[in-house]
Amino acid sequence: MKINTQYLGLELSSPLVPSASPLSDNLDDIVAMEDHGAGAVVLYSLFEEQIEHESRALSHYLDRGSESNAESLSYFPDPIGVQSTPERYLEHIQRAKTRVDIPVIASLNGATPGGWIHYAKLIQEAGADALELNLYDIPTDTEVTAAQVEERYLTVVRLVRDEVNIPVAVKISPYFTATAHFAQELCRCGASGIVLFNRFYQPDIDLEKLEVVPRIHLSISEEARLPIRWLAILYGRIPADLALTTGVHTVEDVVRGIMAGASVTMMASELLARGIGRIEDLNLALRAWLDLHEYDSVSQMRGSMSQIHVFDPAAFERANYMKTVSGWREHDM
């Protein structure tokens, strides 16, 4: 049974897509992803801060002593054989495209309009089939409003769309006041896909060293419930493909995501924990599940449990809150 799907106008042999992670830093791992049945691969992210930091560092060395005398030319760094992070990223795209046939989706991670956005065009020229724009920011300025934050993000998407012709998906966080409206505005700015959701890594406090330290925890299936809720709400209401990217570990997670409205289900934690071969296991399990439940295809199943198709649409909204709380039982936990 075929499990092909469409995402961002691209034909994929499977809805299982490795999301941006360190795994895609290695070309052999990307080849292994294809060999085990991945429908596409999202490369690790190129960060706005990386580009701007290297740009400032280069300007510093080029400017240092440049007005002293002729000997100041010796201060200039020798560019031969020195590759910046962006250059390495572009070369990685090119090499990946020569090694695999599945779509290669690049990832730009940023939050502010700036000169770094022109790298979107370079990513397109390097051969990427699509671009995932990862809007990752923690607004901490007490004078900045939610509307200003959203407009800044929308400006980034508009500027990127001005640079490229390849499809652009936007990966967002779940922390918007009006997620549905914001998703619609992203589509109006040219987004072809919405990826739900960006998973923030929360810092912790080391009580012995009295330091703020990073804590990285892999996701669990339970975390898929929040994006699945919004997939179900958005499906059929906005003109964009939807992707589930948090908490995908089992075939049941994959099926729930597709039933809610996802065109693809992306995973990283499961592959980091159990290996790239897990893709093949889940593809086999998905085919078996479809056959057992008499589905002809993934597309037949997509959106069947979205808000516009279920018997009780209020189940995805506040109306279900009282019922859930009042019906609590210890065995539900």
Image: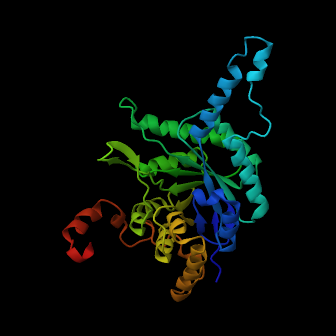
Query: Percent x, y for residue 77?
Result: 74, 29
Indicate the quadrant containing the C terminus: top left, top right, bottom left or bottom right.
bottom left
Using the image as rendered, state which of residue 108 and residue 191 is in the foreground: 108
Using the image as rendered, state which of residue 166 and residue 182 is in the foreground: 166
Query: Percent x, y for residue 309?
Result: 45, 70
Query: Percent x, y for residue 75?
Result: 73, 22
Residue 238 in view in this figure: no
Q: How many labels does the image show?
A: 0
Indicate the quadrant containing the N terminus: top left, top right, bottom left or bottom right.
bottom right
Using the image as rendered, state which of residue 293 and residue 89 is in the foreground: 89
Residue 79 in view in this figure: yes
- Toward the top, the furthest residue is 68
Using the image as rendered, state which of residue 255 and residue 95 is in the foreground: 95
Colouring chosen for the image of the structure: rainbow
Q: Residue at x 75, y 49 (%)?
A: 91
Query: Percent x, y for residue 214?
Result: 42, 49
Q: Quadrant of residue 110?
A: top right
Q: In which quarter of the image is residue 17?
A: bottom right
In the image, residue 274 above or below residue 193? below
In the image, residue 235 above or below residue 110? below
Q: Residue at x 52, y 70 (%)?
A: 258
Q: Residue at x 39, y 50 (%)?
A: 202
In the image, residue 282 above or below residue 210? below
Q: In this view, does 185 lie to the left or right of 82?
A: left
Q: In which quarter of the image is residue 114?
A: top right
